[in-house]
Image (cartoon, rainbow, N blue to C red):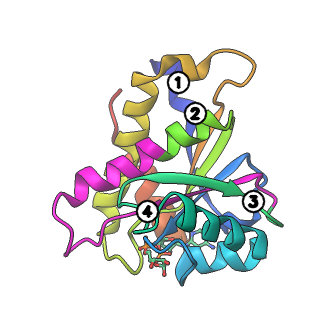
Amino acid sequence: MRKNRGIIRVEQVDITTLRVDAIVNAANRALLGGGGVDGAIHRAGGLAILRACEALRAERYPDGLPIGEAVATPGGELPARWVIHTVGPVYDQDRNAEALLAACYRNSLHCARELNARTVAFPAISTGVYGYPKGDAAQVAVRACAQWIGDNPDALLGPDALEGIILVAFSAADAHTLQQALDAVTW
Ligand code: AR6
């Protein structure tokens, strides 16, 4: 398992600038944009993302995307090919916030594999408007990704093998928090 450690890494960057196969969006259940990283992704990706989200709402999620689930749209004008939209828990409102946050990471990675994405980048889901404490959220993120890799060894094989999971920090302090969690995880 040790050789798999390098797959997960931390980068301090604006996620909308990343030239990866898929970036994950910390969306809301309506899937129609918002503030924070969601707003930044829709602004940079253009109307193609919004139109795809509207179609998903109409055809698959009339009541909104459930918390913890994930669904993909094209990346529009972003350098990333795909955007995987997931909805994190509101920390002091949703019961089982930890399990729901872990499900966001797990289901987004499943979605990335269905797209044959080799590189996928996550923002720190729920740690902004939704109020999840950053240190706790970093631990959940790192553990969920490490566990997913352990549970899905086939994802690391073949021509479309998963090569990188980037945990994106928007500030130096957030990068430090994520790196500490990554260094501490045992797998
Ligand atoms: N690149 C990377 N990370 C970013 C960027 C960026 N461009 N912008 C913000 N972050 P938030 P949530 C970080 O609030 O807590 C929206 O209105 C930010 O520093 O975007 O899941 C949605 O529509 C923070 O660490 O997402 C929902 O209604 C992290 O992204 C709601 O907010 C997540 O902060 C979702 O709230």
Q: Residues within 10 Å of mark 1 (few under 14, many from 20)?
A: some
What's the residue type where badge 1 is placed?
Asn
Q: Residue at x 42, y 77 (%)?
A: 128
Q: Earlier in the sequence, mark 2 or mark 3?
A: 2
Q: Earlier in the sequence, mark 1 or mark 4?
A: 1
Which amino acid is tagged 4?
Answer: Leu
Residue position for label 4: 65
Is residue 123 magenta-colored? no
Q: Position of residue 33 (x, y in %)?
A: 57, 78
Which residue is labeled 2 in the image?
Answer: 7
Span colored in magenta:
79-107
Q: Considering only order in the chain, which callout, 4 or 2, is on the residue closer to the N terminus?
A: 2
Residue 86 colored in magenta in the image = yes
Q: Which mark is residue 4?
A: 1
User: Label 1 to label 4, Cα distance in Å?
Assistant: 31 Å
Q: Which mark is residue 75?
A: 3
**Could you tell me which secondary element the residue under label 3 belongs to?**
loop
Residues at marks 2 and 1 touching, judged by CB atoms closer than 8 Å:
yes
Q: Nearer the viewer, mark 2 or mark 4?
A: 4
